[in-house]
Amino acid sequence: MTKTPRILEVRANVLKDNDLLARSLRERFAQSRTLVLNLVSSPGSGKTTLLRQTLLELSPRYRVAALVGDLATDNDARRLAESGAPVRQIETKTLCHLEARMIEEHLEGWDLRQIDLLFIENVGNLVCPSSWDLGEDLRVALFSTTEGEDKPLKYPTLINTADIALITKIDLAEAVEFDHEAMYRNLREIRPGIEILEVSGKRGTGMAAWLERLEGALKAKRSQH
Amino acid sequence: MHELSIATHIVAVAQEEATARGVEVEAVHLRLGALSGVVVDSLLFGFEIASQGTPLEGTRLLIEEVPLTIYCPTCEAEVELAGIQSLRCPRCGELSGEIRRGKELEIVALEVKD
Ligand SMILES: [Zn+2]
């Protein structure tokens, strides 16, 4: 005689704890009118260079801060701190992504009302950070021209959660025979209509448009309240 | 490998639900969207590790994979996609960002001991 198992229906989102925490962070960021960006990319995409340049250029006019996720060393955090902005490192040890609770922990002692823009540099990885909402306003996926235009096809989940695709190291596009059209097509096949910007943190190409985009988002956020 | 941390959450959430109902778990039924970014084999392996030393040790994780489904405004229909690298409607070729299914990462049922 076979026994039919008793099945109880349950409806539970596996990441509900993270989602709840992310929601409460989002509320705090709304109250303090802090624009929060979650930057996601592969290692070597030029993320730290870009972020350093962004902090430098924004800091005369805005109060900026950064949280930097890193597996161990604090090299990135130190490089970023040279910009003069408050920077904290989040050491993730074995974890390959940042979670909302880490953001909450590392915000302790910071007065969010004194921060206009908060940048979260996620761990260098294009897979794992996709599932974890950090309470950010904009998720920015960075791809460098040197990674090739097929790269987005390997990370559809991440691209599908991104608001902006930022193509970095655009100054090297010619040298590596970067195919703009293929890149745009690949990104938009996965995320129709995704906003795409091209920059070079090193040469400054496209920085004005990127900074303008950030200022526009900050203005929009401030006018909501 | 984020599957291990996701598995840890599955174990915790399943146990939480079991405790609330006063039942003992034999198997966990999970619905997993194609666009959830989770690799099934890694998740199964992660579940074994994450459940060790918990009341869920020795239980099974049963995964129902949910294909990516978009709503195509041209066809005025929900269309299932074979892959996740393009959100183009296979019938008419239209791109649609309207995802209806495929992002699931949820526990839908528990098999329990009588
Ligand atoms: Zn169609």
Image: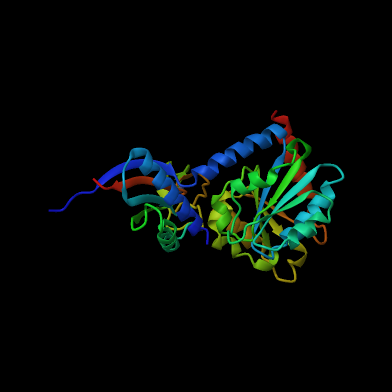
Outermost residue, left side: A1
| Front one among A33 and A195 | A33
Outermost residue, top side: A225
| Front one among B60 and A147 | B60
Image coordinates of residue B13 in percent, x first then y, are 43, 46
Image coordinates of residue A131 in percent, x first then y, are 54, 51
Left or right? Give the position of B87 relative to A151: left
Q: How many marks?
A: 0
| Front one among B53 and A20 | B53
Outermost residue, front side: B53
> Residue drawn at (72%, 35%), measured in percent from left and top?
A33
Task: Report which quarter residue A115 is drawn in.
Answer: top right
> Residue drawn at (33%, 46%), measured in percent from left and top?
B110
Task: Report which quarter residue A34 is drawn in.
Answer: top right
Task: Report which quarter residue A107 is drawn in.
Answer: top right
Left or right? Give the position of A118 relative to B33: right
Image coordinates of residue B81 in percent, x first then y, are 43, 54
Residue B35 can be seen, yes or no: no
Image coordinates of residue A141 in percent, x first then y, are 64, 54
What coloring was used for the rendering?
rainbow
Q: Quadrant of the C terminus of chain B?
A: top left
> Residue drawn at (55%, 63%), measured in percent from left and top?
A154
Residue A219 can be seen, yes or no: yes
Residue A45's place in the image compared with A17, above or below, is below
Residue A32's place in the image compared with B62, above or below, is above
Residue A54's place in the image compared with A9, above or below, is below
Residue B38's place in the image compared with A176, above or below, is above
Left or right? Give the position of A76 relative to A13: right
> Residue drawn at (40%, 60%), measured in percent from left and top?
B48
